[in-house]
Amino acid sequence: MESWIGVDIGTTNTKAVVFDEAGRVLAHHSVGYDMIHPEPDYSEQDPEAIWEAVKTVLEAVSGGLTDIRAVSFSAAMHSLLPVDAAGNPLGNLVIWADNRAKVEAQELRDSEAGRAIFRVCGTPLHPMTPLCKLMWWSRHQPEVIQRSYKFVGIKEFIWFRLTGEWAIDYSLASATGMFDISTFAWHAPALETAGIPEAKLSPPVSPYHRAEASGGAGLPAGTPLIIGASDGCLANLGTGAIVPGRLAITIGTSGAVRVCSPDAATDPLMRTFTYVLDEGTYIVGGGTNSGGVILQWIAEQLFPGIPTDELITRAAAIEPGADGLIFLPYLLGERAPLWDANARGGFFGLTLQHTPAHLVRAVLEGICLHTCSLVRILEERGPVNEIFASGGFARSPEWVQLLADCAGKPVRLPETVEAGAWGAVLLAMKQAGRDHLKWLEGLQITRTFEPDPVRAALYRRLGERQLKLYEVTKELETL
């Protein structure tokens, strides 16, 4: 039987999933790793630990397979790693959650030069972006710029280890803040702003770019490898949210809300991103820091030893609105649509009547309300009729129902929640000449969550109140 392997290199783990041509999962393996926070605002990871995870998952799923058609890759966006000429790391991998470049990002947002870069590149001006990370290094640690052979993302690092080739796909390049999303080339003004020459970046290639494994990592030499795209863009493809009226929401460690577009238009208010899926397809939306990591925080800090599933069940017994308790989920600052690395979280409206279950309910509502603020913005581009969900939260019926109520739209769960890995495989199928979208005809929806209209009206009001509370906290920062 022929098999296709999708590798999804995420923030908390790397997954390898083996699919048949119909998208059925034949095998699956995952390995996790940790974030490193050496200083406040720093978020890093050990690239060698991620490389070991990639090797482990590939070795685990490829054993016994006799007809591997291709291995294709999905990866988290915005990571940056300095390497030497041999591809060895010169430090840790700096990931999307790193906020050390707050000053540089704000300077760009406040400048016409920065706004001009955004109009061409489509990447919001935020500390997460490699552009801002490089500006920070140029200003604070110029020796890192000087001694580094290249600055690469985690997928480039893994790709080089597997193939001996430096390359970055258009999709991940479009998330750096330095890539012209119309011409598919590095943008000279952005590179000048970053303080690096083009030679210190990998050559951009199509997401359908093919190479062969050099051997190792459980893959026979000559195994076809497809470079793939970013996890966010592939989640849209992997869930079927690439047709008009469909919107994809992913909530894992972080979250994202995305729609598909045939053009590279950017938001004049700089609230959302425009990233490349492939040469003719763009993904427009916003990423949020306020995902599952916020639920994990309250579970670890206030409810040690209690599984999050149990906490969600307890929260579901609380009436919508948590008896007037509102939570701002901005514990890591926030990306879209606020783009405020200094944003802070908090509970508002606490009384003696609130129980621990109220706190969890308010946290879940806070995450969903913020996520749905992005749905409203994307509706400005065109109607949204249904939401396709993926990510770890999709395993919780209570959480998915809450999202449907907050959005006021039906939320559908496609058959596979491994959207990034499946999206990567679909690109590999297209590269091989297969009708990679034929599966849409038989796309199986395992469950649909319909919104409750009364709750939807309540949550629309609470969403407006959440935004007003955020604006108040911004004013307090100036006191």
Image (cartoon, rainbow, N blue to C red):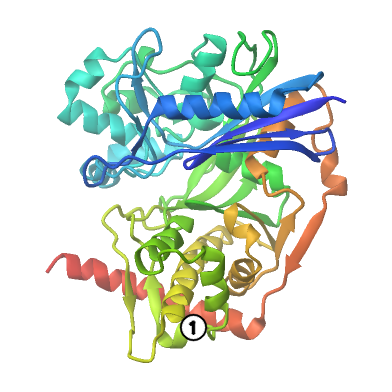
If the image is split into quadrants, where does the C terminus sit? bottom left
> Looking at the picture, how far across and down is residue 205, in whole percent?
56, 19
The answer to which quarter of the image holds residue 20 is: top right
The answer to which quarter of the image holds residue 351 is: bottom left
Looking at the image, can residue 261 be seen?
no
The reply, left or right, for residue 403 in relation to residue 243 is: left
Q: Residues within 10 Å of mark 1 (few under 14, many from 20)?
A: some
If the image is split into quadrants, where does the N terminus sit? top right
Residue labelled with disc 1: 321
The reply, left or right, for residue 124 in relation to residue 477 is: right
Question: With respect to residue 330, does 391 lie above or below?
Answer: above
Q: Residue furthest front?
A: 305
The reply, left or right, for residue 46 in relation to residue 60 is: left
Question: With respect to residue 265, does 137 lie above or below?
Answer: above
> Looking at the picture, how far across and down is residue 158, in whole percent?
51, 21
Seen at 22% across and 47% down, the residue is: 40
Seen at 48% across and 42% down, the residue is: 12
Question: With respect to residue 306, does 24 lie above or below?
Answer: above
Q: Residue furthest bottom?
A: 353
Looking at the image, can residue 469 be seen?
yes
Seen at 87% across and 48% down, the residue is: 442
Q: Secondary structure at mark 1?
A: loop
Q: In the image shown, does 264 or 292 lie closer to the viewer?
A: 292
Q: In the image shown, does 346 or 236 lie closer to the viewer?
A: 346
Seen at 70% across and 57% down, the residue is: 245
Q: In the image shown, does 5 or 55 lie closer to the viewer?
A: 55
Q: In the image shown, does 304 or 293 lie closer to the viewer?
A: 304
Three-letter code, disc 1: Gly
